[in-house]
Image (cartoon, rainbow, N blue to C red):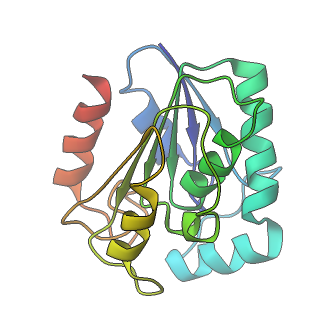
Amino acid sequence: MRWLIVSDIFGHTPELESWCARLPGEAQIVQPYSTQPPRFADDHAAYAHFTVHSDIERFAARVLDGVKRFQPQRVVGFSAGGAAAWLAACSDSFSARQLLCFYPGQVRHYLNKQPQVPCELIFAAHEAHFDVQAVMAKLSHLAGVKVRDCAYAHGFMNPLSAGFDACAETYFTDYLCN
């Protein structure tokens, strides 16, 4: 199995590399930056850096380039990386077979898009800036799109995030691997 992992706004971190090593097969990481940013003190510092140095559209272009170069079967995106992967999957040139996104809140700005491959979007229980259930309801009508929420906070898969939950991370890693 070939995986393209689309990082969140923390970028290509040692923690993400360690997580990728648990996946069966070969994984490649795409991040929103041309070089790895410094370690962030918290989610707010990471977000501030992202808003200055990238955006979802530029990140989506990086995802499409990664798909073209690496030819993965599965693409997994986290947070802004999930939204960028979603936007990339709506392109005719997206050649992966499947997309899974964790807490991709920014997809709320792209609800008029239709992905070209089967997608599963797993939302956090709550988001401060939008109504998760309303976004899920709009996305659930799209062909090939499966949406669900979970009981965890935004960032539950990233040990660097305030929302990290080790049990959730283990559960969803096993979910991906089986």
The quadrant holding residue 161 is: bottom left
Does residue 120 lie above or below 50 as drawn? above
Eyeballing the image, is 115 above or below 70? below
Give the side of residue 91 with respect to residue 20, left or right.
right
- Residue at 58% from the left image edge and 63% from the top image edge: 111
* Residue 131 place in picture, x, y as percent: 39, 81
Q: Nearer the viewer, residue 175 or 18?
A: 175
Q: What is the number of callouts on the image?
A: 0
In this rendering, is residue 140 above or below 92? below
State whether residue 52 is above or below residue 79: below
Q: Position of residue 14 (x, y in %)?
A: 52, 44
Q: Position of residue 98 (x, y in %)?
A: 50, 29
x 80%, y 33%: residue? 65
Residue 55 is situated, as x and y percent measured from the top left of the image, at 76, 66
The C terminus - image quarter: top left
Residue reaching furthest bottom? 128
Give the residue displayed 54% in from the left and 19% down from the top: 73
Residue drawn at 68 percent across, 23 percent down: 95
Foreground: 102 or 163? 102
